[in-house]
Image (spheres, rainbow, N blue to C red):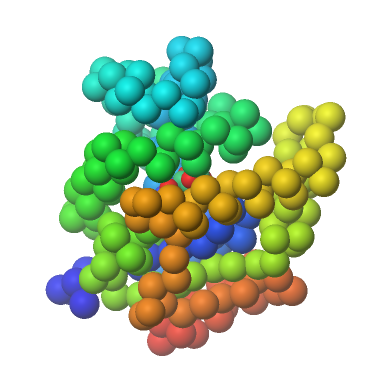
Amino acid sequence: MSGDKLIIAVDGPAGAGKSTIAKKIAKILEIEYIDTGAMYRALTLKVIKNGIDSKDSESILKLMESTSICFKDNKIYLDGTRVDKEIRENIINNNVSNVAKIREVREEMVSMQRELSKSNNIIMDGRDIGTVVLPNANFKFFITASVEERAKRRHKELIEKGEKNISYKQVLAEIQKRDKIDSTREVAPLRKSFDSYEIDTTNKTVEECVDEIITIMGGR
Ligand code: CDP
């Protein structure tokens, strides 16, 4: 347990519904929501904008030295500019896992994430929150869904955002690739920690998942 503070860790693969669910829980419990994926995405955006290959760790680490990433009112800022829309583009989806597997990148992000967890009651989502970032969280949830369902949701989201020439099949392949990198990387791979509750969202509405989690935590 973490003293008198409430700390909730949420992990799971791409498109499982983590952020939608975590945001709702944060609202209900009036606690802060921290999207750690957004931090890896922001660095990836800078990597791409600088024409650096997402596999070029050396150049990425150099670039990171002069990079500032922070949250203000739940919006993510990269070097002082708000980037919450740009970090959701598909080019970021397809490069972020390469950037996130670099050991030194993770060390930097994890130390910022732990710092963020010190001052408030929080719900934090990502891939390694229950296993590495906040192992003493009061509650840990592992949110999953079938890969087909996750690809279907991500495809719909991309189409709604205006990425026109993208097929379901392509999104499915991209998600499978990202799952593989995230769960087989050397540092802090995506894993369900032994003490987390698994929530399979495949055939459930967001509301049903939120209710399930609130019930597990002992009601509103
Ligand atoms: O929204 P979605 O589930 O697609 O991804 P995200 O949560 O924004 O995370 C994007 C990527 O960042 C993941 O695929 C991981 O490679 C990386 N990530 C990570 O390594 N560790 C975290 N705590 C959060 C994200």
Q: On the rendered image, what quadrant is the C terminus found in?
A: bottom left
* Residue 137: quarter of image: bottom left
Residue nearer the viewer, 12 or 115: 12
Residue nearer the viewer, 164 or 218: 164
Establish if 7 lies above or below 52: below
Q: Is residue 92 left or right of residue 116?
A: right
Residue occupying the point 35% across, 60% down: 129
Q: Position of residue 184 (x, y in %)?
A: 47, 55
Q: Position of residue 104 (x, y in %)?
A: 27, 37
In this rendering, the count of numbered labels is 0
Residue nearer the viewer, 83 or 188: 188
Residue occupying the point 30% across, 41% down: 103
Q: Residue lying furthest top in this view?
A: 50
Q: On the rendered image, what quadrant is the N terminus found in?
A: bottom left
Residue occupying the point 28% across, 57% down: 133
Q: Is residue 144 visible?
A: yes
Q: Residue lying furthest left in this view?
A: 3
Q: Position of residue 192 (x, y in %)?
A: 44, 71
* Residue 166: quarter of image: top right
Establish if 114 lies above or below 53: below
Residue nearer the viewer, 188 or 41: 188
Q: Is residue 91 left or right of residue 42?
A: right
Q: Is residue 207 visible?
A: no
Q: Position of residue 96 (x, y in %)?
A: 50, 36
Q: Is residue 113 left or right of residue 52?
A: left
